[in-house]
Image (spheres, rainbow, N blue to C red):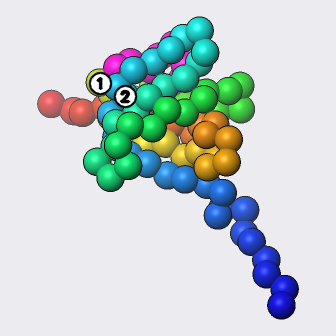
């Protein structure tokens, strides 16, 4: 039997709210409804986008922001972080 695994099998996706950030370690903790708190490592490869700004940096992230994250399940490194800004 030959089993092929697609690359996307290693990719996780979550939605939640930024609970905490560690600027020294470049980690972001996200509170999710289904999986509880998940802490992801932000690297130079991580794509960060903020809805009204476009491309952003780690320093643009703030506790309380709603975020969608894609990450590598085996390393817990964030691949993409997309912040949704609530419009009043």
Quadrant where the image shows the C terminus: top left
Q: Earlier in the sequence, mark 1 or mark 2?
A: 2
Residue 85 image-quadrant placement: top left
Quadrant where the image shows the N terminus: bottom right
| Residue at the (67%, 48%) spot, across then down | 74
Q: Residue furthest top?
A: 24
Is 68 or 52 nearer to us in this picture?
68
- Residue 78: which disc? none
- Residue 18: which disc? 2
Q: Is residue 42 above or below residue 72?
A: above
Q: Position of residue 7 (x, y in %)?
A: 72, 62
Is 68 or 25 nearer to us in this picture?
25
Q: Which residue is label 1 attached to?
A: 64
| Residue at the (59%, 18%) spot, across then down | 26
| Residue at the (44%, 29%) spot, across then down | 29
The boundaries of the magenta stretch are 55-63
Residue 82 shows in the view: no
Circle 2 packing at 10 Å, graded few (<14), some (14-19), many (20+), is many
Q: Position of residue 80 (x, y in %)?
A: 57, 40
Q: Position of residue 68 (x, y in %)?
A: 43, 43
Q: Residue furthest bottom?
A: 1
Is 17 or 34 nearer to us in this picture?
34
Q: Position of residue 36 (x, y in %)?
A: 35, 43
Q: Is residue 13 above or below residue 7?
A: above
Determine whether, in the image, residue 7 is placed left or right of residue 69.
Answer: right
Mark 2 and mark 1 in contact (Cβ < 8 Å)? yes
Is 69 or 3 nearer to us in this picture?
3
Tell me if residue 15 is in the magenta stretch. no
- The residues tagged by marks 1 and 2 sit, at their Cα atoms, a distance apart of 5 Å
Circle 1 packing at 10 Å, graded few (<14), some (14-19), many (20+), is few
| Residue at the (61%, 49%) spot, across then down | 73
Residue 21 shows in the view: yes
């Amino acid at each position: 039997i030959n089993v092929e695994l697609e690359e996307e099998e290693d990719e996780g996706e979550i939605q939640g709210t930024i609970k905490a950030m560690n600027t020294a370690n470049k980690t972001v903790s996200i509170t999710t409804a289904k999986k509880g708190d998940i802490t992801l490592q932000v690297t130079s490869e991580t794509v960060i986008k903020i809805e009204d700004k476009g491309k952003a940096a780690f320093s643009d992230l703030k506790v309380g922001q709603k975020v969608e994250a894609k990450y590598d399940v085996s390393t817990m490194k964030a691949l993409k972080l997309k912040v949704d800004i609530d419009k009043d």
